[in-house]
Image (cartoon, rainbow, N blue to C red):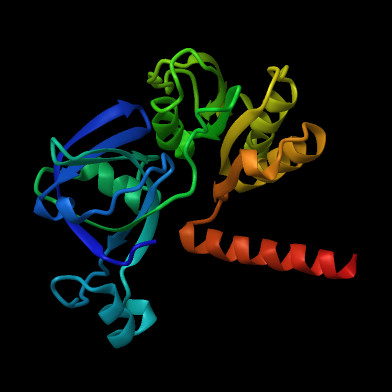
Amino acid sequence: MARRVTDLRVLRTERLSPHLVRVVAGGDDLAAFPDTEHTDRYVKILFPRPGVDYPEPLDMDRVHAELPREQWPVQRTYTVRALDRAAGELVIDFVHHGDAGLAGPWAASARPGDRLRVVGPGGAYAPDPDADWHLLVGDEAALPAVCAALERIPAGRPAVAVLQVGAPGEEIALPGDADLDVTWLYRADADGDAGSAQLPAAVAALEFRPGRVHAFVHGEAIAVRELRRHLTRERGVASGDLSISGYWRRGRDEEGFRQFKADERAREESAATAG
């Protein structure tokens, strides 16, 4: 991911659903935001810590060199929903569940003129136009990348989307001209961690289309772990045709999720060594 900080200002916000807030930002600095062909491109949003003086313009290399870690800005990872260079606008959609968390409450209260500083973008996926059909699986956190992917799938190409939101009424309109078959799942229909089983169960029940699938599968880490096993072992999806990773872990903030991923990697390496 590029380390340069892009310094933007909020232009407007929009409530897309009861728990999804769109923030549109722009400014002169957007002209230097790096281009990428990835539809899952993401940025690290920087939230300065109260009471800390940072170098201006904000330089994360200087911050890391000159300040103790506990004073570094807090980072949150979000997908860029859209980048319109002609209009000078960068769009990010935020999941917002009340006062919990950092980025969601910020987005819900953001006003025109508020500062939005991001590092990036990163990313690795874009729909393969030569695939016979596309599979898109995820929850609210994956919706921006799913929508960006749908806009790039060739018109009329079959696509199957299995998407999880909190409850009825939280669905959003899906863009693009693909021949789309979408299933909406509602976390409210499950109790606690049982919500992690909804996506894997729905994908396991699918009748796969003929030909080569290109799949994008992202969301809660435990659900994604099961989906990876199912798609690679039971469905035989090749690793090169599968973009899959956990975006978050229930009950953990981003720092806790990074530790969860590190623990998972250590567990897998230990298991491989023992085997």
Residue 237 vertical placement versus 204 (above, below): below
Residue 96: image location, x then y, percent? 37, 40
Q: Nearer the viewer, residue 40 or 132?
A: 132
Q: Nearer the viewer, residue 241 or 23?
A: 241
Residue 248: image location, x then y, percent? 53, 49
Picture quarter with the C terminus: bottom right
Q: Residue furthest right?
A: 275
Query: Residue 238's quadrant in the figure?
Result: top right
Picture quarter with the N terminus: bottom left
Number of marks in picture: 0
The residue located at (32%, 85%) in the rendering is 65
Q: Residue furthest front?
A: 130
Q: Is residue 123 left or right of residue 46?
A: right
Q: Nearer the viewer, residue 8 or 1?
A: 1
Q: Is residue 71 left or right of residue 100?
A: left
Residue 162: image location, x then y, percent? 58, 24
Query: Residue 5's quadrant in the figure?
Result: bottom left
Residue 188 in view: no
Residue 12 in view: yes
Q: Nearer the viewer, residue 200 or 256?
A: 200
Query: Residue 25's quadrant in the figure?
Result: top left
The residue located at (44%, 33%) in the rendering is 143
Residue 3: image location, x then y, percent? 32, 67
The residue located at (43%, 37%) in the rendering is 145
Residue 34 vertical placement versus 216 (above, below): below
